[in-house]
Amino acid sequence: MEKVLIVGDGAREHAIAWALERSGVVINAVVGHRNPGIEEVARRTGGRLYLGSPTDPGTVVKAAEDSSPDLVVIGPEEPLFAGVSDALRERGFRTLGASRRLSIIEMRKDFARSLQWKYGVPGRLIYGVFKDVEEAYRFSRSVGAVAIKPIRQAGGKGVRVIYGDAAYLDFDEVYRRGAEDVLKQLAGYRDVDTAVLVEEAVWGVEFTVQALTDGESMFFFPPVQDNPHAYEYGVGPECGGMGTVSPLPFLEEGEVEEAKRAVELTVKALGEELGERYVGVISGQMMLTARGPVIIEYYSRLGDPEALNALYLYGGDAYTLFSLAADGKLHKAERRFREEHTVVKALAPLGYPHRRDVARGRRIYVDWDVIKREGCLVFFSSVEERDGAYVTLGSRALEILAPGRTAEEAYQRSERCMSAVGGDGVYYRRDIGSPEYMSSMAAKAEKVRAVYRWRRERGLGGRVVVWEPGVGLREYKL
């Protein structure tokens, strides 16, 4: 029986373990905490957990040497940034996960933007990189509506989006404070310069295209829509994601294909730029805008919660699929997906995402009879089992996937399952996947679609003119 070593301990890794268990393999995992879901899958398949840092190459290699896996699957981004995949490959382990050099496409937002412009990858945005707050402020004023981001991936957090249509705001102060906050956030990282990326803000419908690649072939999962804001109706601080829906009936096939093409061209550009074959996952967080699909950022792994939708909807054998990618034979992969709809919702403790001290130590419960009756799946994240109860560790506690024959059926089932979990100060977003939510996304998509089609029909789709201080009018060809 084949053995797999999974690196990571979140809901995404629990979903990877669930998918691989269905392939009939033994599951072992390197985890920073005892995720009860991953631990249960390991127990059922005859595997075990290795408690240690998933970002430490030595710890992971030692676990691999002990368990002798036929395949290692790296779930999160931080182990990739730390060179875990490189260390495993150097010792001869068959590994699915981008190298440290290639995972820079996610780790460094400034590198990703530069690569797009150098190689003409479609979906580009105007941007600038600054170490000085005043320089960032001047560029922000010239662009108007901007997104201010740390140049490093920071767990999906730290982004400030400022639109120029709210007259009650003091924009001078908002621009400066946004840059200052981002620079402060980067102070805790030692693997990157302290700098801020300022890029034009766009409006539209967000979605994610996730793909496996062996550097030559691409295997795309159905597009997923993530909801990165903590509270209902897309308000509140950005966090790791409070829920997802897939498939997305409000997107047209041509729009999805355009997004896939941008991701595929990015893989080719990385190969040319770095001289290395990309083996692993690459995802594009996209937005359908008045210019068509644009790239907001990249992932060098499956998203969380987006991975749950993708792995559930895949109708083939996950171990075979991952192995083909690791072996450079992805062109042989079976492209088969379930004709179902899925809604994922995350349960988070009060205090998340900014007050982890407040979010820790909360006890939660799961009514497994309701979960089983409804046909939902529970994927554990930042919790441990203590004295017969689940106790939060400071981040999202668990994620529930609800399938359905229709989008509304999946939503109603998700609500019934979310009512079966609770505890001492927890919350989730009820709006995700609702009929009103789906209708609002369809309406938003129609608005931006009408504009980008009008622009393209008149040859205006690839030009933007911006006035920049000290430069004057500058035309960007997109």
Image (tube, helix red, strand yellow):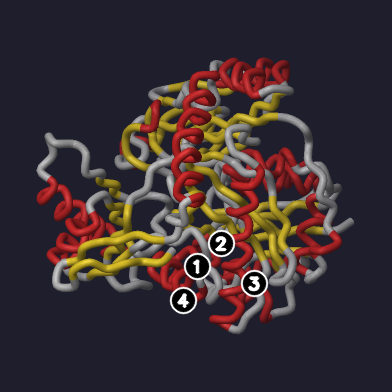
CA separation, marks 3 and 1?
Answer: 11 Å
* Label pair 1/4, CB-CB below 8 angstroms: no
Q: Is residue 267 above or below residue 260?
A: below
Q: Can the viewer see residue 255?
A: yes
Q: Residue furthest bottom?
A: 275
Which dot, 4 or 3, sits closer to the camera? 4
Q: Position of residue 312 (x, y in %)?
A: 72, 39
Residue type pointed to by label 1: Ile
* Tag 1 residue: 105
Name the residue beneath numbered marker 2. 300
Residue nearer the viewer, 225 or 444: 444
Residue 328 sits above or below residue 22 on the image: below
CB atoms of marks 2 and 4 within 8 Å: no
Q: Position of 71 compared to 126: left or right?
A: right
Asked if marks 3 and 1 touch (Cβ < 8 Å), the reply is no
Q: Amino acid at mark 4?
A: Lys
Mark 1, other Cα within 10 Å: few <14 / some 14–19 / many ≥20: many
Q: Which mark is residue 278?
A: 3
Assess disc 3: are there few (<14), some (14-19) or many (≥20) residues with their C-alpha within 10 Å of its C-alpha. Answer: many
Q: Secondary structure at mark 4?
A: helix
Outermost residue on the right side: it is 1
Residue 118: image tag: 4
Label 2 sits on a secondary structure element that is loop
Q: Amino acid at mark 3?
A: Tyr
Lower position in the chain sequence, tag 2 or tag 3? 3
